[in-house]
Amino acid sequence: MPGKVEGIWYTQKKKAEMFQNVRILMSRPNGKLYFPNYEFTNNAIDRKLYFQFLTIMSEYNDVTGTKTPKIYHEKGKHDDIVNALALSCTYFSVKGKVNRKPLIRGYNYTQ
């Protein structure tokens, strides 16, 4: 992919924004981002992605009064593939007025 590489500071706020962006992209009716159905693809990465999504949690810290949720995974589980997806989706951020066309399209398995 041509272009420049930009670094990102991985803070709780940035992580919450990235996961909010993924949620919006996946819930749009025109389908910018499709969730793979690992049962039909028979792909190990799709399976890991699905189960990693199930372990993602968020909570608000009432002590500090912050409005930014803490995004984390269950103890003993992994979130590396889900985080990679969330990070790559920042290119298609729903904030701003840039409408980018996806270079990679996800799966859309329907029956």
Image (spheres, rainbow, N blue to C red):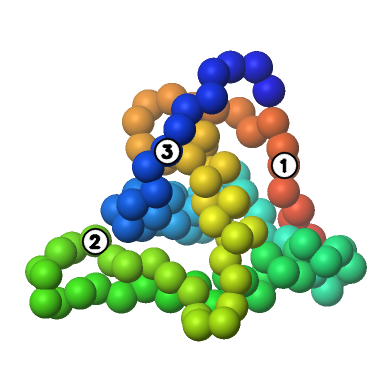
Figure quadrant of residue 48: bottom right
Question: Horizontal and vertical percent for residue 50?
Answer: 67, 70
Element type at marker 1?
Answer: loop
C-alpha separation, residue under disc 1 versus residue under disc 2: 30 Å
Q: Quadrant of residue 82?
A: bottom right
What is the crowding at mark 2: few (fewer than 14 residues within 10 Å), some, or many (at least 20)? some
Q: Is residue 58 above or below residue 24?
A: below
Mark closest to the chain's N terminus, 3 or 1: 3
Earlier residue among tags 1 and 2: 2
Residue that carries the numbered disc 1 in the rendered image: 105
Query: Which residue occupies 43% across, 70% down?
Result: 72
Disc 3/disc 1 C-alpha distance (Å): 24 Å
Numbered tag placed on residue 61 in the rendering? none
Q: Position of residue 32 (x, y in %)?
A: 59, 44
Is residue 111 visible in this depiction of the protein?
no
Residue under the point 61% across and 28% down: 101
Q: Which quadrant would the N terminus be assigned to in this image?
A: top right
Q: Amino acid at mark 1?
A: Arg
Q: Are marks 1 and 2 in contact (CB under 8 Å)?
A: no
Residue 111 at x, y = what percent? 81, 68
Res 99 visible? yes
Residue at image point 48% right, 40% down? 90
In depth, the one of 32 and 82 nearer the eye is: 82
| Numbered circle sitting on residue 68 | 2
Q: Give the residue at mark 3.
A: 8
Q: Nearer the viewer, mark 3 or mark 1?
A: 3
The local secondary structure at tag 2 comes to loop
53 sits to left or right of 36 = left
**Residue ranking furthest to the bottom:** 75
**Is label 3 in a helix, a strand or a loop?**
loop
Badge 1 density bin: few <14, some 14–19, many ≥20, Cα 10 Å: few
Q: Residue at x 54, y 78 (%)?
A: 55
